[in-house]
Amino acid sequence: MKLIARYVIFWQFFPKQSAGSSTEAYMAMHPIRRSLERLRQVWHQSIRRQLAWSFSLVSLTLILGSGYLLFRYQRNFQYAQSTEGAIGLAQALSFSSVSWVLADDVAGLQEVLKGATQTKDIKFAVVLSPQGEVLASTRSEYIGQSLGDAISLRLLTLQPEPHILLNASNLIDVAVPIKAGNRPIGWVRVELTRDTVNANLRKIAFAGIGIAVFLLLMIAIIAAWIARSLTSGLDRLAKVAINMEHGQAFQRAEIERADEIGVLARQLYRMLDAIAAEKKASFESSARLRMIFNTAHDLIWLKDMKGVYLACNPMFERFLGAKEAEIIGKTDHDFAGTGLADFFLSHDRRAMASGNSITREKWVTFADDRYKALLEIVITPIEDASEHLTGVLGIAHDITARKQTEIALKRESEKNLALLRNASDGIHILNINGNIIEASESFCAMLGYRRAEIIGMHVSQWDAQFVGADIGRILDQQFAQQGRSQFETRHRRKDGTVFDVEVSGFPLELESKPVLFNSSRDITERKKMEEELKRSNAELDQFAYAVSHDMRQPLRMVASYLTLLEKALAGRLDEDTREYLSYAIEGAKRMDQMILAMLDFSRVGRKTDPITPISSREVLDDTLAMLKPDIIAGDGAVEVTGDWPELVASRDELMRLLQNLIGNALKYHEPDQPPCVEVHAAATPALFRVTVRDRGIGIDPNQTERLFKVFSRLQARTRFEGTGVGLALCRKIVEHHGGRIGVESAGEGCGSTFWFELPMDTRSSRQSTGAS
């Protein structure tokens, strides 16, 4: 291939034949070009020859290149070996010469060099002093002289280490320092010829040339055989192609090969078979298209550029009331009225002018049965193979039923829209961005806008409570929620006034787009009632506190005077009178305890520690310290387990809650059974739960509802003392923190488990509870 490339380049440098010169004269003037032209003609006459020659030329190039590289490698290798041998010889002589140089013994040095003369290819070896004087030499005439050649002079300037002074193809000259310890005392210089190495390389070269010639002959033979094998069958395929070119019948020549020629042969025959099959398929396709054309339920027709019909199907025949043979060659004016004919012709011209399909709808009446239909007509310009406009193709589809369905759906949508607009609640539909796309009249009236003004408004334009990112967050939450969402906010009217509303809504899809169907309800009156109820409860708590506080003074006075009477008349009272007096004193004391309990009950949420972050474990430890006398007196035990985290609550209220529950567990037990109480706590990111389990007297499951009511007692006062306010106080504390409280018991004698749950952050819980 390189030869061909060189031939092409060489060809370009020769002048081209002029128009006036003859071929013979031109070739005579350029014999080299004539030879190259003949070579080119011979080259292009046969693929077989091209393959054989190319393979041979490539192989020759590879053989010569590989041989050259191998020879060069061998030469470098043997040269390196001879260099290492010279340095090794010089080092051996240097080592052997140290003592003789120190002794200045020339005879000893000569004896050392005498052994070097036996080395093959040695030219000379000398021992030099540091000043360059020859101390010993294989050539005795040099002894005592100073060598003045350039190599020797350069050696005296070099560092005392081995040096290659000359490295030629026929000669190697090396020098090694002679050292006594680390002190240089002279040089050993050895010069060798490379006659033996070069003789070996010549033998290798002759052997390589012989092998290359043999390989080239073998490759030429193999290349000729491969080229013949590869191109066998191409002649037959060429004849088949020539016959095809001239439109003559061809004889199929089967070629049983799996290579490219076999593939080419099979593809050629397949192409010939495909041409025949294509003709057959074209005929069958035309028949199928004609069948589809004739059986289609749509109206199909074909016109030329002047509006003359070229073809149509039976449905179009029904429309015009004539057969295809009667329609072909005529125009719309021959069958339809002027208005309908102009409609079709104008749209034909518009489609051809734009080069695109156009779609129109038209009510028509079929000529054969007077059937009225709404047709969706598509006019498409058609072109020939050269992309020249030739006419139009028309297809009309009956959309009467679809149109009637659309009209019914539109009426239903209008009815639903009317219901939405007239709904009593403030219904409004928001798109994904928070803009109103539809609203009821009541919502418009609620905000004081006309409907035309409110459509398109954003939530931020009427919501007075949430701003900026908060609005986006609430919208995202509503769209993400599967069911109904509900929250309270405040709306701003057009006149600037603000009112409270409760918004409820759910996401849905409208015309394949996500929307929010929201409803706003004015809760201004409800808010007023809630505030009034809160104020009334506060007044009631204050009243209860005042009454309880004021009642204690006369009650204490009654108890004091009764006690004084009891002491003053101790010796004069009979047994019944003393018992009656004792009942009166005990009643006054119980009444005082009940008033104190009522005072505690009324203080919850008013006169207690503020709600702040506290340690639940510290509160529990303080509670157990207060209850320690009761634990010791009853020979009881309290076991604490679980996780006691920090939470946000009122410290003294949590302490009273724990004190009441643990104190009850220590109190309500059988006399012969010491109280054993288990207090366990568990926490989640949102909730703090405490359980107080005892093994006491238990509770009838049917009576658990009464436990948390004020002054409600399940046990007789003669058995267990108490005011009946403790558990009611617990419930009020838990509810004040936005939590829950309850009790579980299998029955009397089975023990009880009281539990309560508080939010980890009571502040947020109370805010959300108030909002909901």
Image (spheres, helix red, strand yellow):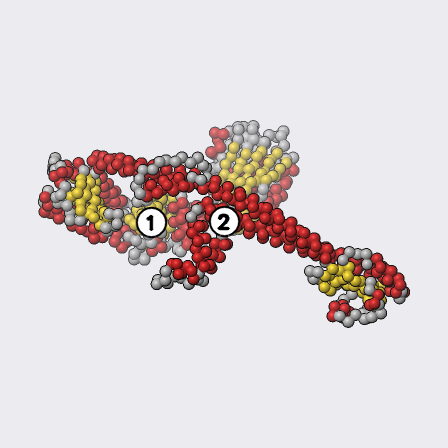
Q: CA distance from mark 1 to mark 2?
A: 76 Å
> Residue, x 53% and y 37% (percent of image)?
755
Identified at 84% across, 57% down, the residue is 115
Q: Amino acid at mark 2?
A: Ser
Lower sequence index among marks 1 and 2: 2
For mark 2, give the secondary structure.
helix
User: In percent of the image, x 41 and y 59: which residue is there?
Assistant: 27
Tell me whether circle 1 and circle 2 mark residues in contact (CB < 8 Å). no
- In the rendered structure, the answer to whether residue 102 lies left or right of residue 207 reads right
**Residue marked by disc 1:** 431
Residue 374: x %, y % from top left: 18, 41
Q: Is residue 236 left or right of residue 422?
A: right
The residue carrying pointer 1 sits among few (fewer than 14), some (14 to 19) or many (20 or more) residues within 10 Å by Cα, namely many
Judge by depth and name the residue closer to the eye, 755 or 68: 68
Say what amino acid the circle numbered 1 marks.
Answer: Asn
Q: Which mark is residue 31?
A: none
Q: Position of residue 127 (x, y in %)?
A: 82, 64
The nearer-to-camera label among 1 and 2 is 2
Foreground: 95 or 347? Answer: 95
Q: Quadrant of the C terminus?
A: top left
Instruction: Using a 10 Å C-alpha cutoff, classify the residue at mark 2 as few (fewer than 14 neighbours), some (14 to 19) or many (20 or more).
Output: some
**Is residue 709 something one can see in this rendering?**
yes
Q: Classify 126 as above or below 674.
A: below
Which residue is at a point 53% across and 28% down the rendered structure image? 747
Residue 605 visible, this orientation? no
Between 28 and 619, the one nearer to me in the picture: 28
Q: Which mark is residue 54?
A: 2
Vertical placement of residue 192 versus 362, above or below? below
Tell me the SS state at disc 1: loop
Q: Position of residue 333 (x, y in %)?
A: 10, 45
Image coordinates of residue 112 in percent, x first then y, are: 85, 60
The image quarter containing residue 129 is bottom right
